[in-house]
């Protein structure tokens, strides 16, 4: 596996690969099985797969979250090697933001106004900045993103569409632990007790899906699930909402496709998840 650290190394390699199909998996490291599934997907579908590992400070609205973000670079490299990844790009800040590649911005007014948007001001703008630079450096044919970050997938979809990048977005299903907890780099920050309790998040999503399939209205389901969450004092609810899965607009009655999205704090760790209903 090639380990690339500078934008120049990356561009030199990329410019020698004119006739290859290129897959790209952007990450912030602390890799888990969820990331590896994205990479495996890309390896199967492309001649050459790049993974990036870069903890992007611009997308953290909370300094403590940035400081506490797990960094496990040696382990990450080993995991990527074990599945035969072609190349990993591990840049320092300046190699991304001062390498002479300009970032793009898009109108995120709607996506910034719902769900994660108001809870994490500036987050999606930071994601767009870094992803647009990485796209310009790597020039992939296909880019792989996990559906656990459902709203992020919508942001990237809009970025590709608005800027007309010749890139196909491949959203990939959330990978779950045996008890249903969505895999996330932040899970390692949970105490053993909180880790056990975290399985409730998936149970609430499953319950929402059952209620939806039984014909309950969106308002009814949101009320039932929110009351349920509030009974568990370990969890602090950020939001639980059911929305249109195409554009995340509000919906009222059972109509397909819908998605339930949840964000809670547990043990001081913010966890998000979602489920198609
Ligand atoms: O989903 C992530 O890990 C990050 O938001 C991404 C896409 C790598 C951009 O920093």
Image (spheres, rainbow, N blue to C red):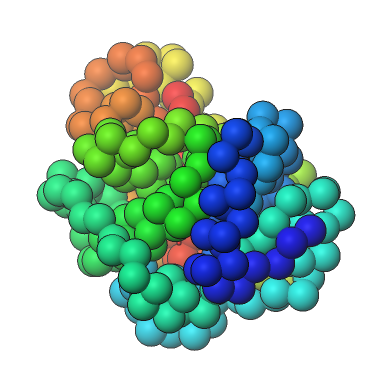
Residue 160 drawn at (x, y percent): 33, 38
Q: In this image, 187 relative to 147: left or right?
A: right
Residue 38 drawn at (x, y percent): 64, 42
Residue 191 drawn at (x, y percent): 67, 74
Q: In this image, 77 relative to 147: left or right?
A: right
- Examine the rendering and report whether any part of residue 260 can be seen: no
Q: Quadrant of residue 223?
A: top left
Q: Which residue is at 40% across, 41% downward? A: 153
From the viewer's side, name the closer residue of 208 and 17: 17
Q: Which residue is at 29% across, 22% downward? A: 217
Is residue 82 depicted above or below 30 in this figure? above
From the viewer's side, name the closer residue of 87 and 151: 87
From the viewer's side, name the closer residue of 213 and 34: 34
Q: Which residue is at 21% across, 24% downward? A: 252
- Examine the rendering and report whether any part of residue 271 can be seen: yes
Quadrant that contains the C terminus: top left
């Amino acid at each position: 596996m090639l380990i690339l650290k500078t934008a120049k190394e990356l561009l030199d390699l990329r410019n020698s690969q004119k006739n290859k199909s290129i897959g790209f998996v952007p990450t912030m490291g602390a890799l888990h099985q969820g990331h590896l599934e994205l990479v495996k997907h890309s390896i199967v579908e492309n001649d050459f797969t790049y993974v990036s590992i870069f903890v992007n400070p611009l997308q953290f609205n909370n300094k403590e979250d940035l400081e506490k973000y797990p960094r496990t670079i040696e382990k990450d490299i080993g995991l990527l090697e074990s599945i035969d990844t072609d190349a990993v790009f591990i840049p320092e800040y300046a190699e991304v933001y001062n390498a002479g590649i300009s970032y793009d911005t898009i109108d995120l007014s709607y996506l910034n106004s719902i769900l994660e948007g108001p809870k994490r001001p500036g987050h999606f703008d930071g994601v767009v900045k870094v992803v647009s630079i990485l796209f310009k450096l790597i020039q992939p044919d296909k880019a792989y993103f996990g559906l656990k970050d459902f709203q992020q997938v919508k942001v990237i979809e809009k970025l590709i569409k608005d800027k007309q990048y010749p890139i196909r977005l491949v959203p990939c299903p959330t990978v779950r632990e045996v008890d249903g907890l969505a895999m996330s780099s932040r899970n390692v920050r949970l105490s053993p007790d909180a880790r056990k309790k975290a399985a409730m998040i998936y149970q609430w999503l499953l319950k929402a899906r059952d209620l939806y399939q039984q014909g309950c209205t969106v308002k009814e389901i949101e009320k039932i699930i929110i009351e349920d969450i509030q009974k568990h004092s370990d969890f602090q609810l950020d939001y639980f909402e059911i929305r249109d899965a195409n554009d995340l607009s509000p919906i009222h009655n059972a109509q397909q496709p819908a998605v339930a999205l949840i964000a809670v704090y547990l043990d001081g760790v913010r966890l998000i998840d979602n489920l198609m209903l």
